[in-house]
């Protein structure tokens, strides 16, 4: 603020431009990363724009080698939640940690759990036996549930398992759904695996992969419906027709079936819901279905592609089974817009405004920033040697959080210039006009060319 004084006069304050500048630099409220994939649709799209270059702001050593996959990161308000643990003389001990987003200091811990959903002052944690509601580190309610997948929150429902919907405030059961799947017999072995549930547009999507094998007696070729003797050698055969996926759409309010879609491929990752469509990928195919009736909206043939990973208002981001070819498809029609060839294998990714952040499985491909509209790499950051199988990058405010299988949590924040030789900036897309008034600098929001 400049104050101009003249002899015998009152102060004259030049406010208009200064006020405009101050308003321009006040950041908007940070968007919470409330669950895996950010939201119940697994879009992994945050409107908080974190601009590179970035540097590690703080890190914690959680004390043990995590199992695969690495623990998730959940952010709500000024708290970042993750799973931590130690290996001691009595075995393995783990807990959910609540840490300060600014410096990583511990606020509270809760044993034998992993964070799932944060909403207001509630944290919903889970293990393979139960789901629980915590408030300030204290248990409010707990319900038994058997699931290998983290719950999601949709409307007032905490949805988990295969599928149970609890009211998030008191844990009461609102509805249950158990799919009617074929059962195995004496001749066939059947394995059904459930992917994380997805929800959006008043619809819950349950995705199931099924593998079926027929038993044969390789010694005699006899019918396996009769018991063999002790010399019988059993083997199994399967064909592509016996590997399939199933999408089941449920009404979010009642849990009633709306439609079922059988898919002749194994689904490679959790479905993504954006608008009135659900997207899946697997076995070289990416498909879009209508949430209304399950009809196919479009199908894209992409040899080797298997995972649908993120969606912004314009694009669906998918990658191949090796994580080296990341492709942006138009949500409207599935047309490929760009392909980014990742020099290292990608592990997971998230969208921050108009920037796609990718974490790699090796230190050399630690954290990479790509323009989501063009597929052009704009920055990369090499990580230490213990950067092994990192988690999805989680975006909130001006921070990015990642955990690794080595038991560390990394918090990244923007820097004005690279602080070490491992940070290699590339030219950023064009920025807005910069206006300087004295010591006050105002920058318009970063703009990027749309295709």
Image (cartoon, rainbow, N blue to C red):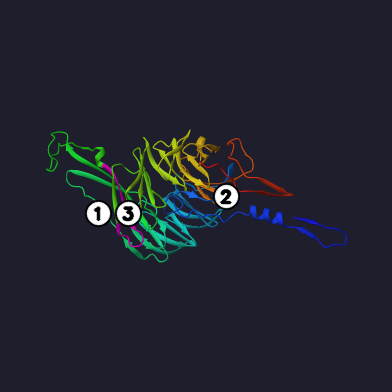
For label 3, the SS is strand
For label 2, the SS is loop
Q: Quadrant of residue 128?
A: bottom left
For label 1, the SS is loop
Q: Earlier in the sequence, mark 3 or mark 2?
A: 3
Q: Main secondary structure of the magenta part?
A: strand
Q: Measured from the top left, where is residue 54 in percent x and y?
A: 58, 43
Q: Residues at badges 3 and 2 in contact (C-beta under 8 Å)?
A: no
Q: Using residue 224 as the reference point, say whether residue 431 is left or right of it.
A: right
Against 347, residue 102 (above or below) is: below
Residue of label 2: 398
Q: Which residues are magenta?
A: 243-257
Q: Is residue 289 visible?
A: yes
Q: Measured from the top left, where is residue 327 in percent x and y?
A: 44, 38
Please report the residue visible at 37 percent of the width from the left and 62 percent of the height from the top.
166
Residue 249 numbered mark, or none: 3
Q: Nearer the viewer, residue 119 or 142?
A: 119
Task: Count residues near mark 1 (Cα–Cα under 10 Å), then give few for <14, some for 14-19, many for 20+.
Answer: few
Q: Earlier in the sequence, mark 1 or mark 2?
A: 1
Residue 180 numbered mark, or none: 1
Q: CA distance from mark 1 to mark 2?
A: 46 Å
Q: CA distance from mark 1 to mark 3?
A: 14 Å
Q: Quadrant of the N terminus?
A: bottom right
Q: Using residue 280 as the reference point, say whether residue 82 is left or right of it.
A: right
Question: Is 246 covered by the magenta stretch?
Answer: yes
Q: Using residue 212 as the reference point, say whether residue 12 is left or right of it.
A: right
């Amino acid at each position: 603020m400049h104050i101009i004084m003249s002899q015998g006069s009152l102060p004259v304050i030049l406010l208009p431009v200064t006020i405009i500048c101050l308003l321009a630099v006040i950041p908007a409220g940070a968007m919470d990363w409330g669950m895996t994939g950010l939201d119940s649709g697994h879009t992994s799209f945050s409107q908080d724009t974190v601009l590179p270059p970035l540097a590690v702001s703080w890190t914690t050593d959680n004390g043990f080698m995590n199992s695969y996959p690495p623990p998730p990161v959940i952010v709500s308000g000024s708290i970042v939640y993750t799973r931590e643990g130690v290996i001691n003389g009595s075995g393995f001990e783990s807990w959910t940690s609540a840490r300060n987003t600014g410096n990583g200091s511990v606020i509270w811990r809760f044993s034998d759990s992993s964070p799932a959903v944060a909403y207001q002052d509630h944290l919903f944690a889970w293990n393979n036996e139960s789901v629980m509601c915590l408030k300030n580190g204290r248990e409010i309610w707990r319900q038994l549930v058997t699931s290998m997948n983290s719950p999601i929150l949709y409307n007032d429902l905490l949805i988990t398992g295969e599928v149970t919907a609890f009211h998030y405030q008191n844990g009461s059961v609102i509805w249950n759904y158990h799919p009617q799947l074929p059962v195995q017999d004496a001749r066939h072995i059947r394995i059904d695996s459930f992917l994380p549930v997805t929800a959006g547009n008043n619809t819950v999507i349950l995705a199931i992969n099924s593998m079926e094998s027929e038993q044969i007696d390789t010694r005699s070729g006899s019918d396996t419906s009769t018991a063999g003797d002790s010399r019988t050698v059993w083997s199994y055969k399967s064909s592509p027709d016996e590997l399939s996926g199933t999408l089941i759409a449920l009404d979010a309010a009642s849990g009633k079936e709306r439609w079922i879609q059988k898919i002749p491929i194994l689904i490679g990752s959790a479905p993504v819901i954006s608008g009135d469509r659900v997207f899946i990928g697997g076995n070289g195919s990416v498909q879009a279905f209508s949430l209304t009736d399950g009809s196919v909206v479009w199908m894209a043939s992409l040899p080797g592609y298997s995972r649908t990973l993120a969606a912004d208002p314009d694009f669906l981001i998918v990658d191949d089974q090796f994580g080296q070819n990341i492709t942006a498809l138009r949500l409207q029609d599935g047309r490929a817009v760009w392909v980014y060839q990742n020099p290292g294998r990608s592990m997971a990714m998230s969208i921050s405004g108009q920037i796609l952040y990718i974490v790699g499985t090796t230190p050399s491909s630690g954290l990479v920033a790509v323009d989501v509209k063009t597929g052009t790499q704009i920055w990369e950051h090499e990580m230490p040697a213990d950067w092994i199988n990192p988690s999805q990058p989680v975006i909130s405010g001006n921070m990015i959080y990642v955990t690794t299988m080595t038991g560390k949590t990394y918090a990244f924040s923007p820097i004005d210039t690279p602080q070490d030789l491992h940070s290699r900036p590339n030219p950023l897309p064009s920025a807005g006009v910069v206006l300087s008034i004295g010591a006050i600098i105002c920058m318009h929001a970063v703009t990027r060319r749309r295709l």
